[in-house]
Amino acid sequence: MRTIQAVVAAAVVTLAACGKRPESAQTATADSARGMGDMQAGMPGMPGMQMIPQMRVHLDSIGSMQPTQMVTMMPAHQRLATSMLDAMGADMRGRNMQPNAAWTALGDSVRGDLADMPGLSGPTLTTRMQAHIARMQHMMVMHEGMMHM
């Protein structure tokens, strides 16, 4: 069962990094987008907003993995998270917004997680990943709030 979860998670992350999603991820993403009133889907030119539903699916997946699976998925997660941070920055620049201190501190924490987690394993990685996921989720909520002002 865990092998199947790892394979499915790897496929979701791999396809997400390519901009393609398997049908199950499309359904979950569509449900997330509908739950947000299609706000992200209706924001052309805002790549950070468009990535949020995909990232929510990815974080749910990686958060349920065993530490050994997390280690395997770490390079793909780092790429996806870095792309999202860059895209959120582009959204803000596109609206001539400057990051506030809370945003900057949260972004620094997320980048610190991405730098530190590859050296972790076992329960330490699981604990750090859960905290990282919470920070990523908080960052997405903050971003949505800033983009809808």
Image (cartoon, grey):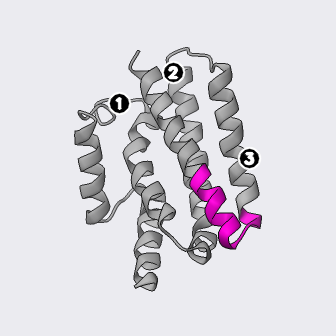
SS assignment for the magenta stretch, majority: helix
Q: Earlier in the sequence, mark 1 or mark 2?
A: 1
Q: Position of residue 39 (x, y in %)?
A: 29, 31
Image check: 5 left or right of 122?
left
Crowd around label 1: few <14 · some 14–19 · many ≥20 (10 Å): few
Taking the magenta stretch, the answer to whether it contains residue 122 is yes
Q: Secondary structure at mark 1?
A: loop
Front residue (pair 95, 55): 55
Q: Secondary structure at mark 2?
A: helix
- Which of discs 1 and 3 lies nearer the camera? The answer is 3
Q: Position of residue 98 (x, y in %)?
A: 62, 16
Front residue (pair 75, 120): 120
Q: CA distance from mark 3 to mark 2?
A: 26 Å
Front residue (pair 139, 22): 139
Q: CA distance from mark 1 to mark 2?
A: 11 Å
Q: Which residues are magenta?
A: 118-131
What amino acid type should be assigned to the residue bearing mark 1? Answer: Pro
Q: CA distance from mark 1 to mark 3?
A: 30 Å
Q: Is residue 146 above or below residue 60?
A: above
Q: Earlier in the sequence, mark 1 or mark 3?
A: 1
Q: Is residue 34 above or below residue 143?
A: below
- Residue where numbered disc 2 is placed: 94
Say which residue appears at 27% left-offset and 64% top-offset.
Answer: 24
Say which residue appears at 43% left-offset and 24% top-offset.
Answer: 145
- Which of discs 3 and 2 lies nearer the camera? The answer is 3
Q: Earlier in the sequence, mark 3 or mark 2?
A: 2
What amino acid type should be assigned to the residue bearing mark 3? Answer: Gly
Quarter where residue 57 is shown: bottom left
Image check: 145 left or right of 115?
left
Which label belongs to residue 130? Answer: none
Which label belongs to residue 44? Answer: 1
What amino acid type should be assigned to the residue bearing mark 2? Answer: Gly
